[in-house]
Image (tube, helix red, strand yellow):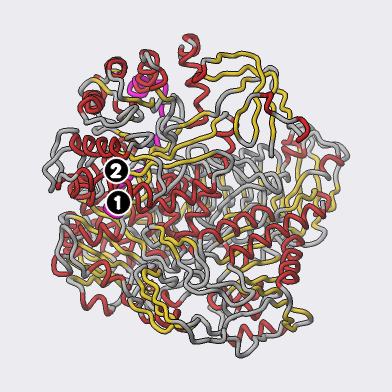
Amino acid sequence: MEFHHLGTKKIFVDTTTEPVTSLEEILRILSAKVLQIPHGTDIPLKSGEKRIIENVACPICAELCDYLKIEITGNRIVRNIGGCAKSVSKFLNYHKDRILKPYIRINDKLVEVSLEEALDKAADILVNAKYPLIYGLSITSVKTDEYAIQLAELLRGAVDNPSTFCHGPTSLAVQEVGGVFTTFSDVINLADLVIFWGSDPINSHVNHLSRNIVPKGRFIGGRKDRKIVVIDIRRTELANMADLFIQVKPGRDVELITALRMALHDLDIEVDNVAGVPRDMVYKLADMMASAKYGVIMYGLGITENGVKHRSVEELMKLVQDLNEYTKFAVMPMRGHYNVVGSNEASLWLTGYPYAVDFARGFSRMYVGVTTAMDLLINGDVDAALIVGHDPVASFPRKAVQHLSRIPVIVIDPKWSLTTAFADVIIPSGMTGIECEGSAYRMDKIPIRMKKILDPPPGVLCDYEILKLLIDRVINKKVGKA
Amino acid sequence: MRMTVTYHLRLKDKPSVLVDARSITPDSFAGKQLNGILSLRILEGGRQITLQDLFDVDGPSEAPKDPGEIAIVIDGSINKISFVGYKMSKGSITINGDAGHFIGYRMRGGSIVVHGNVRNYLGAKMRDGSIEVFGNAEHWIGAKLLGEKPGKGMKGGTIIIHGNAGSEIGSGMKSGTIIIDGDAGNSVGNHMVGGTIIIKGNCGLYPGLEMSSGRIVINGSVEALLPSFYVDSLIQPLKVKGITFNKSFMSFIGDALVGGHGLLQVSYEDNKELLEEFRKLLE
Amino acid sequence: MTQILIKNGYVFDPLNGIKGEVTDIAIKDGKIVDPRELNPEEGITVINASGKVVMPGGIDIHSHIAGPKINIGRMMRPEDHYTTNKPGVFPYIRAETGLSTPNVFRIGYEYAIMGYTLVAEPATPPVMTRHTHHELNAIPIIDKMAYVVVDSNWMLLDLITNNDPKLLAAYLSWILKATKSYALKLVDPGSDFAWLLQGRGLDISDELPVYNFTPADIIKSIAEAAQVLNLPHKLHVHCNRLGFPGNYATTLRTMELALNIHRVSEGLALHVTHVQFTGYKGDSWSTLESGGEEIAKELNSNPYVSLDLGQAIPDRAVTTMTADATFQFVLYHIMKNKWYSSDIESDGASGIVPYKYKKKNYVNTVQWVIGLEVALLARDISRVFIATDHPNAGLFTDYPLIFAWLMSKKARKIP
Ligand code: SF4
Ligand SMILES: [Zn+2]
């Protein structure tokens, strides 16, 4: 999982029954290929004129704080005002460990090549593949997502984004029953009850509380006018700040959701204890929810990746739908990567499905368990991979990583990563939100403009420009073949 | 008397990517010359190939017009070959080896036997016929697709798995029977509106979630039950679809949240701890 | 320089009164010119249109083709995509999917095939318009534009309270510019604000919570601001009480407002959209009648309004989606299936519910009648637009059906 998921300190955050790959294992698996990352590849910093750029959006988590003040001298970022610690570190270290030149692997060695050569080799790999997978996205702009999907369609391959591991179940639940959603502004101005369920913004979305919970809204005072409830498997730091903490048995949240729905439907709850929560507490919580003026459940991986996954989220959606018979109530999925929502959205308008889309038959299809990146990789169902702005080797289970080591892999990324150690072709890209502009979607689906505040290193293009060139090349090669 | 002809398909090279072999059904073989069968279209990943690119085929030079007279035997299949038996109406398919996703998808009749493991969506949305798997099966057996209404899953026929099976078995099923000899995963029979699911082994979380009708029998242990199922009675022995289980079962009615009257029957002996509270309620 | 000559088609041009004359149309650098102005030496692309109709591209004034709502519709209805696919053709024709929630490619291709060249997305909340433009940009071939929803915007409600029409006009002008939208849209004016605070809707003369004015005041203030700004399409109004029996009275009162506002610019003052949904007479679903006749009468006597039909299509599975969150909540209770609702950054709210119109359903039949009745009774058809409020009352691909119903009594006979 990504940093912000690790941050939730959940014991039961299991995306798979497979053990996660350790670095040693990776090295062992890699024995066929040489793990080789050039040293000292920082962008040389030059001092110069001082500039302050305001209202910069932070390209890290889906909180997408868009009020940062970034101070730059020359090409050095010296200050980030408004960003959390993660944000400060990302901005101030943007120049470190950068891929500055394209590479291809020849006889187990990475060889520096021109962009033309790298693109040509990449196009060859993709055109010769029977069923390539394009994975990543969501740490880039929607424009990049659009090109990546077009490429998958041209290649009749599959394309997936990381929601496949975190909030994919949210999409599946919406497919089944819909849902009731809200946005930050409504929370700030109206919400008098906020329930954090299986989510821990203190660690995952650091600015979330100060931005949405603490401020005074138009129809509500600040923190003192909002009741905060935390439902989690253990007492988190957030739980200590809450008005009510409810500890639920790991993976058993659905029982509590069901019991709450039963309370709202005036159905008897026969058992004394639901998922570790006493029956009286269930009634108390149900009452609290139904009598709120505007309630919001902010849920995280504790719901989506636990127990019955998408069925848990489905029941949660039903719960808020039921609550709307009494009052105003909504959910807010605490999504991870800064543009994972955008990759879902772009995928929807182009293909009709939010993620895990396959084009084998020339049109889009999505079958969970079949066209999902994890299933395709673990079972070795694809024969080439293009990874855009992601490091799957660092987060995928061993079997998936093993398969990646066996097939040709192309990586488009601004920074060196474990995945680049595998790659047969590496093409450097600019960092979206710092060196490349575009749109990203906040966790509540609000589109935010990502600014370009610095030029990319010399010769380095933005990922959408690279994909566009790759698309042209793939078309030419396929036409040539036919 | 009806004659049955057999086509033997032997896998040549193992494909390296998912294969869509929906043309392997008695229906698409029926009435075709052998040449026509050999050139049936198959998708290897996103590439169009023909049946003969993938398989050596032995069989009569002309197939009968009635698919009911056709038996297809596939040897050496691997878990990438998917969609075999798609919409088949009659006849039989035997797979000696593993099989991929969507085996018997939207099947309308006839029989499929797999001597190996299968992957997801086995017999999903099937209407009739029978499927028997001697190995394990993964998720979404006899299920509806996501987003479809309850009742759009399996509408009839029988699926028997002799090994273990995954989650979402019989999701949204309307009728028919699913029998799992081994263990099953989570949310068995969710959104069921009819039909019968029998799990002879153990079962994961929340069988019957949002079921409105139908019957689920679990002969082993259950990881957890939903509070929206109301205990009804203790019975012994339990008879279902010609099978008799000679031990006591606790019957629940649910899922109350959808006003359901589905029957969920769970082995009492294998779940004493979990069911103790309900036994007290019965007294 | 491109020069095109379209030869021998039956030419229709309502503005110039040309009705089916067989003649040639010449195009030079994107403009229609006298055929004599074409220069044969520079090369002319000749299109033989004999036996075919040549007409100006169709304009769809109200079709939900882009933005957060339709995209959530796509997410919510995978079953609309499983069996409605058409593969792409390498390399430039993209794969199509979806009927009531089509992907961007199907939208562009199908409109082009029907001869439409300009389509308006009728409801985009200001803060979401960046998203709407992403989708509009992705729709191939046709021209697109968007109307921005302004009725429940808090800043705007404050400006109405302060009674400062100049500042209000300036603010609206800024919103249009900032969101790159073409026109202003009111959806069930004021109701989303009431929904947000109290989970209920408003009639045209109910007072808003917090503010002491009514939806009628909102319509009037914004319509007058649109006069000051001299917008080409002044104000697009989805009336209050949409979807409730008896609402035709609200619609009539909304239309009457066009007569009472201070008009300082030319043309129409109000456009009332999808009148089918707001043309219900009777006090309950069982006593439902068509208010089409009354609406047509008002249209005939009131020269400042135009309308579109929101024509219902029998036996059509649709996905209803409006910024009218209140109505969608009601619909969810009728359908008892899926329901999606979202409050959007205090600008408004929206809802989505799958629905199917049935020939045998009394209410649906009345709905079918309303649209046709309005269109057939209208005297000035240039103020009546054909639309289904896609994908609410029918799909835009159903338009040929509506043309047939309007032109032929025989076609109107439902078997
Ligand atoms: S909370 Fe997230 S978006 Fe905001 S500054 Fe921190 S990392 Fe960036
Ligand atoms: Zn509309």
Q: Tag 2's secondary structure?
A: helix
Q: Is residue A191 magenta?
A: no
Q: Chain of mark 2?
A: C
Measuring from the top left, give residue C208's x and y in whole percent. Answer: 15, 42
Q: Horizontal and vertical percent for residue B209?
A: 38, 53
Residue type, numbered disc 1: Asp
Tell me how many marks there are: 2
Element under disc 1: strand
From mark 2 to mark 1, how far is it between C-alphas?
8 Å
- Nearest the camera: C292 or C355? C292
- Coordinates of residue B105 in the picture (x, y in percent): 61, 46
Q: What numbered label is drawn on residue C343?
A: 1
Contact flag, marks 2 and 1 (Cβ < 8 Å): yes
Read off the magenta span. Answer: C345-366
Q: Nearer the viewer, residue C100 or B179?
A: C100
- Give the image quarter of residue C1: top right
Query: Do we see residue B45 in this rendering?
Result: yes
- The percent position of residue B219, horizontal first and vertical second, equals 45, 59
Q: Residues within 10 Å of mark 2 (few under 14, many from 20)?
A: many
Q: Is mark 1 within 8 Å of ligand 2?
A: no
According to the picture, the residue beneath numbered tag 2 turns out to be C325
Quarter of the image where ligand 1 sits: bottom left
